[in-house]
Image (tube, helix red, strand yellow):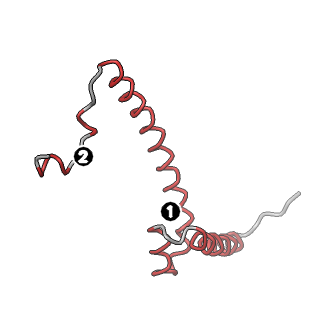
C-alpha cells in the first residue's frame, strides 16, 4: 500500500512544477499578455498555472458560444436575404460612414 504524502511535500512538488510550467509558458508564448506580466513579476509563478487553465477554459467556453451564434447569424442572413446590422463596425456609428 502506498504511504500518504505529506502536505509539505505536495506544496514543494506543486511549486517546482508551477515554476517549470511558467518558464515553459513564457518560452513558448512570450508575446501573450500573461507571459509579459510574468516576465515583469516573475514571483507570481505559483498562481500562473491556475490562471492559464482558467483562461483556457474561458476561451473554450467563448468559442462554444460564439460559433453557434455565428452559425445562427449566417442562417438568418441566408434565409432573410439581408445582412444583420450587428456586423457593422462600431466606429461607423460615430463617424457617420
Q: Which mark is residue 63?
A: none
Would residue 87 be found to the left or right of residue 25 on screen?
left
Instruction: Count residues near mark 1 (Cα–Cα under 10 Å), then give few for <14, some for 14-19, many for 20+.
Output: few
Per the image, label 2 sits on a secondary structure element best described as loop
User: Looking at the image, is 78 positioned above or below residue 58?
Assistant: above
Would residue 1 be found to the left or right of residue 16 on screen?
right
Would residue 13 be found to the left or right of residue 31 on screen?
right
User: From mark 2 to mark 1, how far is it between C-alphas?
Assistant: 31 Å
User: Looking at the image, is 45 positioned above or below residue 95?
Assistant: below
- Picture coordinates of residue 39 (x, y %)? 50, 79
Q: Quadrant of residue 8?
A: bottom right
Per the image, label 1 sits on a secondary structure element best described as helix
Residue that appears at 53% across and 61% down: 52
Q: Which residue is mark 2?
A: 89
Instruction: Count residues near mark 2 (Cα–Cα under 10 Å), then give few for <14, some for 14-19, many for 20+.
Output: few
Residue that appears at 23% across and 34% down: 85
Residue that appears at 59% across and 72% down: 22
Total marks shown come to 2
Would residue 75 be found to the left or right of residue 87 on screen?
right
Quarter that holds the N terminus: bottom right
- Picture coordinates of residue 2 (x, y %)? 85, 60
Of marks 2 and 1, the one in the foreground:
2
In the depicted view, which residue is nearer to us: 33 or 1? 33
Which comes sooner in the sequence, label 2 or label 1?
Answer: 1
Residue that appears at 48% across and 43% down: 61
Q: Quadrant of residue 16?
A: bottom right
In the depicted view, which residue is nearer to us: 8 or 70? 70
Farthest residue to the top: give it. Answer: 79
Q: Which residue is mark 1?
A: 51
- Picture coordinates of residue 25 (x, y %)? 59, 69
Amino acid at each position: 500500500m502506498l504511504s500518504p504524502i505529506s502536505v509539505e511535500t505536495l506544496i514543494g512538488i506543486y511549486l517546482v512544477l508551477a515554476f517549470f510550467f511558467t518558464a515553459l509558458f513564457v518560452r513558448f508564448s512570450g508575446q501573450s499578455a500573461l507571459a509579459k506580466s510574468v516576465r515583469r513579476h516573475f514571483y507570481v509563478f505559483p498562481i500562473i498555472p491556475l490562471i492559464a487553465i482558467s483562461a483556457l477554459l474561458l476561451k473554450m467556453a467563448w468559442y462554444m458560444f460564439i460559433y453557434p451564434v455565428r452559425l445562427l447569424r449566417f442562417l438568418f442572413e441566408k434565409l432573410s436575404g439581408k445582412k444583420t446590422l450587428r456586423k457593422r463596425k462600431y466606429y461607423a456609428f460615430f463617424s457617420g460612414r
